[in-house]
Amino acid sequence: MEISPDTKIIWSWGFVNLNLTIIFTWAIMAMIVLTAWMATRKLVVHPPLSRWQNIFEAIVTIMRNHIREIIGPDISRYMPFVGTLYLFIAVSNLLIVIPEYRPPTGSLSTTAALALCVFFAVPIYSIAAQGVGGYLKHYIEPSPIMLPMHIMGDLTRTLTLAVRLFGSIMSESMIAGALLAIIPFFLPVVMKLFGLLIGQIQAYIFAVLASIYIASAASSDRGRKQEEIPMAYRGGGHVLGK
Amino acid sequence: MKIDLFTLFAQIVNFLILMLLLKRFLYRPIVRTMDERERHISASLEEAEQKESEARREAAVCHAERQEIEDKRGEMLSMAQEAAETWRRDLIQQAREEVEERQLRWRQAIEREKESFLRDLRQRAGAQVYEIARRALADLATVELERHIINTFLARLPGLEKPGADAFRTPGMETAAIAGRQGGTQRPEAVICTAFAIDEETRERIEKAVRERLAGDFDLRFEESPDLICGIELRAGGQAAAWSLRDYLETLDEKMSLAFAVKTEE
């Protein structure tokens, strides 16, 4: 039984292997961008708003509020990164209701790619916020002895991000496949619904954790920032993660 | 469960492309639209607040103006009431004075009418008294009575020139020199007037007494005049001496007229 869509190669040319993961990713990207373009093509300031404008405004508002709660009032530069993470993961997990669809987030390559993006985004945003010196300084705070810990922390959190998302989605697929073999009727439907829920939660967790990492690194006063992060988010990585 | 490196890089690129596309097509326009709406709303709210404060200010101004108008109205009302009261008092006073004046005029008119009536009454009463007395005396008058009167007349005639001789009522009766005063060529004449015809003997007595009393040469003529009622009258040279009931009545009439005139003047 194949557990990753990476293994199903559609087209191959040397190093380039177009597998299902990339194909579905493109499809999801096209769908999101097209829908967004359609929705924002005729934006109006004053009501009545179109249905799609309403939906996207609601989504963007909710995301902005969440990011604002975590990062702070100035969120315009973080919004595209965190919002895209959430939208991509959520849509990719939502589409599992379509038969023969394999979510790209069920591929470790995808989740690792997203985690790597977060891994690089954290220093980039941090340097943009407080400069190179400010970013590097936090590695030797409160004492230079903590330097290995900080480096380990950066690496492991990237790893946990990747594995958590992959594990959640992959395990759901595996459980569905296993149950399909044991009990062919009814229960897989329930499991599918459960998988939908898990997928949305994981999208939320991924985006929130990315926000927290960025926030904690981008702030010069780490302690104060940690104080400001809500309790649920602060422990989220450990409580909700596997 | 392995990581395909190509897929890994491809997904990183895919994610970055998706992020840029969404930034271009989703976040930026949506956020811009929402910000613009927010600006509009806050501008509207601000405008509404401004208008509200303006309205409140205007309401306060209106309230103050209304209060002022109310005050002025009350003031004007009280002034009008005062003026009306003054006017009313004036009118009442005027009416009272008019009434009093009319009353006075009415009283005066009444008084005048009363006086006029009384005067008329007095005149009528006097006339009536006069008439009654005249009739009564005329009824009582006789030849005999006249003879008595003539006797009395003749008895008093000599005393005419003496002081207190105004027993003959006729004022300024001068018996002296009638003929001399008349002068002229025509022969003087004295007239004896009686109400009844008198006999010859009496005529002679009279003539004798008269010629004794009056100096000069003159003719004596006897006349009868019922106007005397009863009595005798001597006329000579524009003067007369008489004692008759008519004289009494005329004296009565004069006195009554005089009394009425005095009463009216009062």
Image (tube, coloured by chain):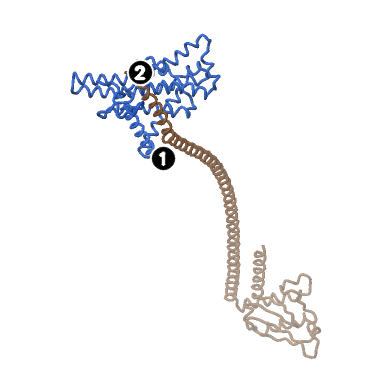
Chain colours: A blue, B brown
Residue B177's spot in the image, x, y percent? 80, 81
Q: Is residue B208 above or below residue B133?
A: below
Question: If the image is split into quadrants, where does the C terminus of chain B sit?
Answer: bottom right
> Are both tags, 2 and 1, on one chain?
yes
Residue nearer the viewer, A145 or A142: A145
Question: If the image is split into quadrants, where does the N terminus of chain B sit?
Answer: top left
Residue A98's spot in the image, x, y percent? 26, 30
Which disc, if any, is residue A43? 1
Residue B54's spot in the image, x, y percent? 53, 41
Q: Nearer the viewer, mark 2 or mark 1?
A: 2
Check disc 2 and give the amino acid type: Arg
Q: Residue at x 40, y 34 (%)?
A: A57
- The answer to which quarter of the image holds residue B138 is bottom right
Residue nearer the viewer, A138 or B149: A138
Q: Which residue is mark 2?
A: A164
Tell me if B177 is positioned left or right of A201 in this view.
Answer: right
Residue nearer the viewer, A165 or B263: A165
Q: Is residue B77 above or below residue A52?
A: below
Residue nearer the viewer, A80 or B77: A80
Tell me if A12 is positioned left or right of B216 in this view.
Answer: left
User: Whole-Å distance between the Cαs marked 2 and 1?
Assistant: 38 Å
Q: Label 1 lies in what chain?
A: A
Residue B113's spot in the image, x, y percent? 58, 65
Which residue appears farthest toward the top when viewing the image? A145
Q: Secondary structure at mark 2?
A: helix
